[in-house]
Amino acid sequence: MRAMRLAPSQLVVSLPEDLNHPIKIRAKHKVAGMLLLDRDHASRLDRGWNVPGVYILLDRPDAKGRWGAYVGKATNPGLRHRVLQQLKDRDHWYRALLIRYESNDDETLNSAEAGWLEGELYNCLESSRLVDLHNRSRPQDPTLTEDDEASLFDYLLPIESVLHFIGHTLTPRASDALDGDGPFTRRIESKAEPGSDKPKPYVSIFGYGPNPYLLQNPTMEEAMARFALILAGKRPISR
């Protein structure tokens, strides 16, 4: 029986002041460290990322939400070397998501662990109707103990949450979804202002509006709570 952990995957996103630097992302449980790297900035990748791990090369989503991807792993010399090599070998990707072990500077993923993650990410993307994989064949990941698999499952939910957060969703948008529907929105019935027959204005959590499907007069606390749910891979929508 495969061991699994399904705890919420809260993420910490560090936005750089210099837009020419990549976005650092880590899971709150401090296991999965991730880096979202633009192709144009790959040559500036810090040498600290020359460690074992896995990576996903991302194509831009098309108008229907479909996107291409390539899943790979790096062991020795590491992720930085492999991504720089992929600059020459593959021209389809515009971003790369790099994943490594984060908790202890003296520890890294070993070859078997990186191979297992590579295989599981391949399975996840292959099962999505929105993803076209560029891998010629499924990576052959080694068999791990249940305890090892249980610890590595902590990586999978944060990775899926990051993909969703950056617009690379794994599930198609519902055909009956309303305009303005999305993870930041919920349906609210319009109500009139006191002493007026005009409905109250509705605005997005960032203050845009009006839109009858967005939050009404949200507080900063409500906006941040909703944003936290997005990072945890949940859809905070009530009908």
Image (spheres, helix red, strand yellow):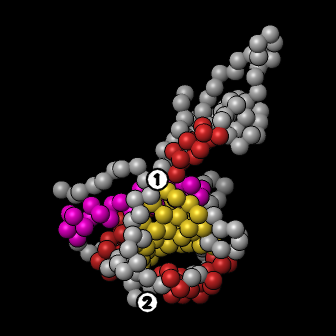
Residues under labels 1 and 2: Cα distance?
30 Å
Residue 18 is covered by the magenta coloring: no
Q: Secondary structure at mark 2?
A: loop
Residue shown at the point (55%, 41%) measured from the top left: 225
Q: Secondary structure at mark 1?
A: loop
Q: Is residue 141 above or below residue 121?
A: below
Q: Is residue 21 visible?
A: yes
Left or right: residue 158 compared with residue 196: left
> Label 2 belongs to which residue?
77
> Label 1 belongs to which residue?
10
Residue shown at the point (36%, 50%) measured from the top left: 7
Q: Nearer the viewer, mark 1 or mark 2?
A: 1
Q: Which residues are magenta?
A: 144-170
How many residues crowd mark 1 within 10 Å: few (<14), some (14–19), many (20+)?
some
Amino acid type, label 1:
Gln
What secondary structure predominates along the stretch shown in magenta? helix
Is the N terminus in the top left, top right, bottom left or bottom right quadrant?
bottom left
Estimate the x, y position of residue 139 in percent, counting from the top left.
Answer: 36, 75
Estimate the x, y position of residue 123 in percent, counting from the top left.
Answer: 38, 63
Is the C terminus in the top left, top right, bottom left or bottom right quadrant?
top right
Amino acid type, label 2:
Pro
